[in-house]
Amino acid sequence: MYGTVAHCRIKPGAEAQLLAELREFEQAHVPGAVATLVYRMDADGRECYIAVAFRDRAAYLANAQSEEQDQRYRRMLRWLEGPPEWHDGEIMAHLGLPEQSRQPGQPT
């Protein structure tokens, strides 16, 4: 897998709008997209990290170079204090959850 982690700062009162933009990415069913995680930092609730995973580097690059992604990115910028700091790279492992973390009734 391959992906990116973005470090950004949300404009005051814009968290809901940012999350709505990110949900639109999920609903677009971008080829090769696997998961999106959004972290709000404890130390500063306006600071966040967005991690996006793709099946492979080719799928990531195809999305990153697409006009549709450029439009999504420009809409997302409206809710941030400035451009995100991006960190791209190979996802070395997806480790999952330990057995004891499963909820009752979940398959094993």
Image (cartoon, rainbow, N blue to C red):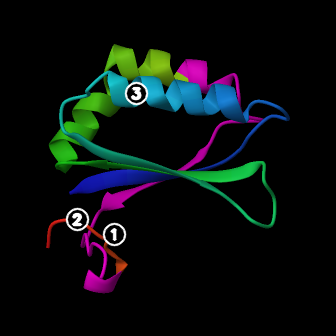
Q: Is residue 90 left or right of residue 78?
A: left
Per the image, label 1 sits on a secondary structure element best described as: loop
| Labelled pair 2, 1 in contact (Cβ < 8 Å) | yes
- Mark-to-mark CA distance, 2 and 1: 6 Å
- Whole-Å distance between the Cαs marked 2 and 3? 28 Å
Query: To which quarter of the image does residue 64 belong?
Result: top left
Residue occupying the point 40% across, 27% down: 25
Query: Where residue 63 sits: x, y (%)?
Result: 29, 30
Instruction: Determine which residue is flagged by label 2.
Output: 106
Q: Is residue 79 left or right of residue 5?
A: right
On-image quarter of the C terminus = bottom left
Q: What is the three-letter code of the residue carrying label 1?
A: Gln
Give the magenta part as a residue range. Answer: 74-100
Q: Secondary structure at mark 2?
A: loop
Q: Measured from the top left, where is residue 59 in percent x and y?
A: 19, 38
Give the image location of residue 55, x and y in percent: 17, 48
Residue 88 is a magenta residue: yes
Q: Residues within 10 Å of mark 1 (few under 14, many from 20)?
A: few
